[in-house]
Image (cartoon, rainbow, N blue to C red):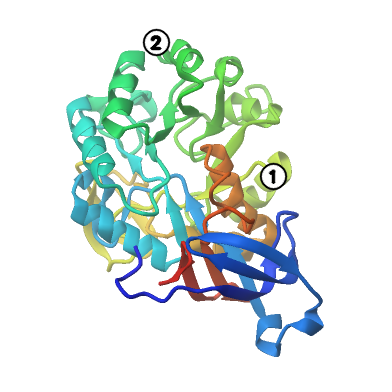
Amino acid sequence: MPAEGAKQIKEVKGLLYTTEYEFRPGRIRIEGDRIAEVDFCTEGELSEVERETLVLPGLVDVHFHGAAGYDFCDGTQEAYRAIEAYENSHGITSICPATMTLPVEQLKQILTEVSGDKPDSLVGVHLEGPFINKAKKGAQKEEYVIPPSVEVLKELQKCAKGLVKLVSIAPETEGAIDCIRELGKEFHFSIAHTMSDYDTAVKAIQAGAKHITHLYNAMPVPTHREPAVVGAAADDPEVMPELICDGIHIHPCMVRNTFRLFGAHRMILISDSMRAVGMEDGQYTLGGQEVTVRGALATLADGTIAGSATNLYDCMCKAVEMGIPKEQAIRAATINPAVSIGVGNKVGSLEAGKYANIVIADKELHRRQVILKGVIL
């Protein structure tokens, strides 16, 4: 959130990231918290510094748990503000934090608190639990896993005042397909923490699940005879998979090939970060479980990877290091995730009428400045 007395900005010039997913020289005019106009020009009309300046949309993270020593499930305004400040300062200007698998009453309290005085850059909430498969729980607590329930989801959404945008769900669990089909107009459903085979995943996708939570992680490994969730997702042109590009969760070869398989227009980069991001190595918690963080690696006592210790901007840069073209990586961290949760009309690209959420960087993507709703942070 911008500090009191922060500087309002009226104009930004440089190489703009366009809605055609390329860079063109131009100028953005800002009025209040919105982009008023986007004009393109020749490079000769820019200064030498402006010709070396990349102007990106603010990033959109639709799956992360915390930062700066705090977790979204701490359920306090102090936590929300600290997380928001960290994310914003790193160019992530639209946040959709994820809950963990917790008791329903605790989830209600968390959602009630955040909806009562929501952070300025909050665009939604992602329920990563409790509707998962215990066999693929990952860093989630097994005792709080429950079957998918229309009634519970409606209660949670009521507490959230409509803020829940994304719901992770294991489609093979009892009631999951019916839940997706019945509430598909109110929530975006994501296949997650699952033992689903190909056919069951196809049924879930046909019912309306068009998002995949951290592809490859916490799901069966696809083979040539059992393509599983990955194959079902690749088959449907509307499905958008998340990918954690922290250099630990997914091998660079698989990152490159996943972009080829799905196409850059479908890929969503996420951080899946936990409270240790931005902090020193040490002991932390995630969903009530002890986590050890060493560098970018966060693990439970049994060695299970427990989220990441990398923010989305760094994940985007890591994807570029892995060989993903810069323009594709930016797309996967901005407009694609915004569209995937239904907020692409407000954020995710540099267009007139959208919020003036902008990252100024050099050609190597080193951040120089972040603008949140027209204000320099």
Q: Nearer the viewer, residue 166 or 77?
A: 77
> Could you tell me which quadrant the N terminus lies in?
bottom left
Quadrant in the picture for residue 200: top right
Instruction: Determine the residue positioned at 29% across, 19% down.
Output: 152
- Look at label 1 and name its amino acid: His
Judging from the image, what secondary structure is the residue with disc 1 in?
loop
Provide residue 4's location: percent of width, then percent of height: 29, 71
Residue at point 40%, 68% (across, down):
89
Instruction: Report the front residue among 126 and 145.
Output: 126
- Give me the residue at 55% from left, 45% from top: 337
Q: Is residue 363 visible?
A: no
Q: Is residue 329 left or right of residue 244?
A: right
Q: Amino acid type of disc 2? A: Glu
Q: Earlier in the sequence, mark 2 or mark 1?
A: 2
The residue under label 2 is 174
Q: Which residue is mark 1?
A: 265
Which of the numbered marks, if any, corresponds to residue 321? none
Give the crowd class for mark 2: few <14, some 14-19, many >=20 residues within 10 Å. Answer: some
Q: Residues within 10 Å of mark 1 (few under 14, many from 20)?
A: some
